[in-house]
Image (cartoon, grey):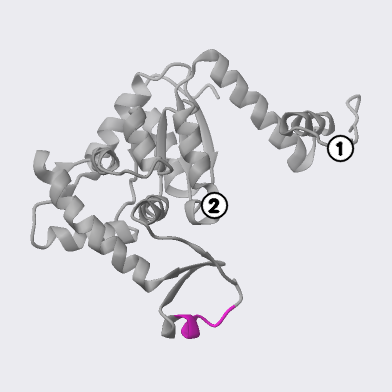
């Protein structure tokens, strides 16, 4: 009862770090938790921690694509585990596609008649997915030349090395040697395209190799920390990888 809530004071032209400090003075509700998260992240960076980042849901179509790319380029993360949706939609933009603002409360049957797919209140025209197929199929042929039985991380590293879009987090990760795992890659348009390719060509995305590579990273991690943007598969895959090591997450 000794620690009292201090009320947040807003000032003209405040910087983000100043706002976060004010949130920390409050120390409660979401404001307090944001400030605590920033404090922990800062501690991880000072300690030189191996930072595992889980990125759930469909955050790329929600506008966070360049945030992920910047985090990779500025070496704020060492390993990424994400969903097939985030990878798919990163590649869509890398291939020249786009995401449009829409409405959440809308007649989906009507959207289908117009050839529009919906991700909550984000719209993607059908021709964008056709563009995606036109681009990814020949890329599968290129990236499997060095072996067709690969982990999702190796697949995405090879794909990233062929991309030209500097805003792509898949490209940035390949450039910075940050592994990007997608353990549920089959649950995405990218996964469907991989399956289509595998019907006539050699391609085997080995989920057990994902586990092997991730456990190796966890075993060799220094002062390991986890940053979780959403839950689901990315969160669990990060946590389970540490189970087979003598370590635990410090942060």
Q: Nearer the viewer, residue 149 or 72?
A: 72
Looking at the image, which residue is at 34% across and 59% down? Answer: 188
User: Would you say 141 lies left or right of 86 here?
Assistant: left
Q: Which mark is residue 63?
A: 2
**Quadrant of the image occupied by residue 120:** bottom right
Secondary structure that dominates the magenta span: helix
Q: Position of residue 136 (x, y in %)?
A: 24, 56
Is there any visible trace of residue 154 in the rendered image?
yes
**Quadrant of the image occupied by residue 176:** top left
User: Would you say 73 lies left or right of 11 here?
Assistant: left
User: Would you say 70 lies left or right of 185 here?
Assistant: right
**23 is within the stretch colored magenta:** no
Q: CA distance from mark 2 to mark 1?
A: 26 Å
Looking at the image, which residue is at 71% across and 36% down? Answer: 33
Quadrant in which the C terminus is drawn = top right
Q: Nearer the viewer, residue 20 or 37?
A: 20
Looking at the image, which residue is at 37% across and 57% down? Answer: 96
**107 is within the stretch colored magenta:** yes
Q: Position of residue 70 (x, y in %)?
A: 50, 35
Q: Position of residue 154 (x, y in %)?
A: 24, 38
Q: Which mark is residue 12?
A: 1
Q: Does the CB distance between marks 2 and 1 fall below 8 Å?
A: no
Q: Which residues are magenta?
A: 106-111
Q: Which mark is residue 238?
A: none
Which SS class for mark 1? loop
Neighbour tally class for label 1: few under 14, some 14-19, many 20 plus, Cα within 10 Å:
few
Q: Please say if 154 is above or below 78.
A: below
Lower position in the chain sequence, tag 2 or tag 1: 1
Looking at the image, which residue is at 31% across and 52% down? Answer: 185
């Amino acid at each position: 009862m000794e620690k009292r809530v201090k009320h947040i004071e807003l000032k003209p032209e405040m910087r983000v770090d100043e706002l976060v400090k004010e949130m920390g003075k409050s120390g409660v509700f979401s404001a307090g938790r944001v400030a605590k998260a920033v404090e922990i992240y800062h501690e991880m960076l000072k300690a030189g921690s191996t930072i595992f980042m889980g990125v759930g849901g469909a955050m790329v179509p929600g506008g966070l694509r360049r945030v992920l790319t910047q985090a990779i380029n500025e070496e704020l993360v060492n390993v990424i585990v994400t969903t097939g949706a985030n990878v798919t939609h990163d590649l869509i933009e890398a291939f020249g596609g786009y995401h449009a603002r829409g409405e959440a409360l809308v007649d989906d049957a009507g959207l289908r008649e117009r050839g529009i797919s919906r991700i909550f209140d984000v719209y993607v025209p059908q021709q964008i997915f056709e563009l995606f197929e036109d681009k990814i199929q020949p890329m599968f042929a290129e990236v499997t030349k060095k072996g067709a039985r690969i982990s999702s991380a190796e697949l995405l590293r090879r794909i990233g090395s062929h991309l030209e879009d500097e805003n792509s987090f898949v490209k940035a990760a390949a450039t910075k040697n940050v592994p990007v795992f997608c353990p549920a890659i089959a649950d995405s348009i990218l996964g469907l395209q991989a399956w289509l390719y595998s019907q006539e060509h050699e391609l085997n995305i080995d989920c057990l190799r994902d586990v092997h590579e991730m456990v190796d990273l966890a075993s060799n991690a220094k002062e390991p920390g986890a940053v979780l943007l959403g839950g689901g598969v990315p969160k669990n895959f990060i946590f389970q990888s540490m189970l087979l090591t003598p370590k635990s997450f410090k942060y």
